[in-house]
Image (spheres, helix red, strand yellow):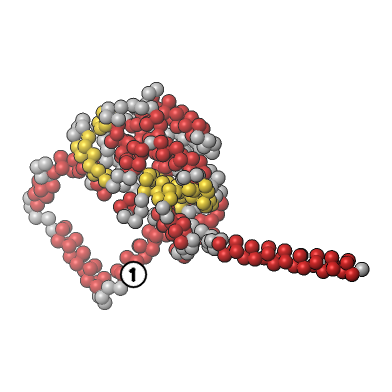
Amino acid sequence: MLSLFRVACFGVSLFTLTNVMINDARAAVDAQTTPLVSPLVIASGSAIVFDMTDNHLLYSSNADKVMPIASLSKLMTAIVVLDAKQPLDEIISVDIHETPELRGVFSRVRVGSEISRRNMLLLALMSSENRAAASLAHHYPGGYPAFIAAMNAKARSLGMMNTHYVEPTGLSFNNVSTARDLSKLLIDSQQYPLLTELSTTHETMATFSNPPYTLPFRNTNHLVYRPDWTIQLTKTGFTNPAGHCLVMRTVINHRPVGLVVLDAYGKYTHFADAGRIRNWLETGQASPLPSAVFPAAPALLSIRSAYKPAAHRAARANNNKLKSHAAGQTAYKKTRSGKPGQAAAVKTARAAQATAARKVKPGQTAYKKAKAAKPGQTAYKKSKAHPSGQTAKNSAGDREKQVD
């Protein structure tokens, strides 16, 4: 009996010692474990972030949701052009005749003018020039249809099974993909060092021939101008159905990172989300979203839940209508807030002008007609109405039919 009692006591002691050792080991492991980071929150409808050294997933949100990608399409356009290994210094013409999406879309680049294939690539990637992207497709071996087929074949070869292209610019909302699919395109883009050079160029003066003219272009991603960002590749995009989009290869916290941000509502939301992602990877802390990110949240969230082009366009049109109404109301209030008697004075002055205008002196009508036909005035008006007279304020890219 005594022996059994000793054995039992020994077993209890051993069990207690084992538990103490296990708890001590757990405490040691917990002490070495990095504290859990706060969950990342972004404003865009879809995103994916991954480490490009081993393709390890760092963050994803609605990464498999199929949606329009706007001018992110031009990244695939550039890759297909480079795969064809056509001479980059070859001079090609601006040709859009097989791209119906470009009808009625403003561009400072003149149809029929000429520039090198390399510069066409530069304008398509850096400044998101739609006519440059379309021209690259028109001068592809086999023609425009062969180019679109090559875009889709390349997507399938990369495993981008939820991606489809119908044209090279991104103007069509039938150019669709997912954040996960576009991450595969980012991985493949590492094989093309020229893409880094062209897509991150800050600005350029493009000189065309036939006829000769020069135009300035700037990068559509303002982050390339900031010294605190190391960007290895970038492409932006925007249409009403797609929202604002961004793909980037960059360096965050001393490691190469790929990020895709889709379906951002605000003009700068995709850039702000890139900043939130970087801060989260560097500090482990999530930046709060501003309350103004989602105006009219219920309506917007219903659009985000299922892609509906017509509903999306209607929501944005209604928003613009409300802004226009508010602006008109402000002007009305300013008029009403004038000094006492101001409205009456204005009416009196207008009535006096009308009376004076009716008192036409002999020969005055003929004088007015002669004055209205100044030498060169008709030619001046015609030249001003010509597209070549339009200023750079309507730059190609993100101002072209709501697309960059």
Q: Identify the residue at horizontal 42%, vertical 42% (top origin).
A: 72
Looking at the picture, tell me which residue is in the foreground, 103 or 44: 44
- Residue 140 against residue 332 in the figure, above or below: above
The percent position of residue 39, horizontal first and vertical second, equals 54, 60
The percent position of residue 188, horizontal first and vertical second, equals 45, 37
What's under tag 1, amino acid-wise? Lys
Q: Relative to 60, is 370 on the left or the right?
A: left
Q: Residues within 10 Å of mark 1 (few under 14, many from 20)?
A: few
- Residue 120 against residue 267 in the figure, above or below: above
Looking at the picture, tell me which residue is in the foreground, 278 or 324: 278
Splitting the image into 4 quarters, where does residue 217 fall?
A: top left
Q: Identify the residue at horizontal 31%, vertical 39% (top origin).
A: 122
The residue most toward the right is: 1
Q: Identify the residue at horizontal 21%, vertical 37% (top origin).
A: 207
- If the image is split into quadrants, where does the C terminus sit? top left
Q: Relative to 22, is 100 on the left or the right?
A: left
Is residue 271 shown to the viewer in this render? yes
- If the image is split into quadrants, where does the N terminus sit? bottom right
Splitting the image into 4 quarters, where does residue 99 fall?
A: top left
Splitting the image into 4 quarters, where does residue 271 fall?
A: bottom left
The percent position of residue 328, horizontal first and vertical second, equals 35, 62
Is residue 295 shown to the viewer in this render? no
Q: Which residue is mark 1?
A: 333
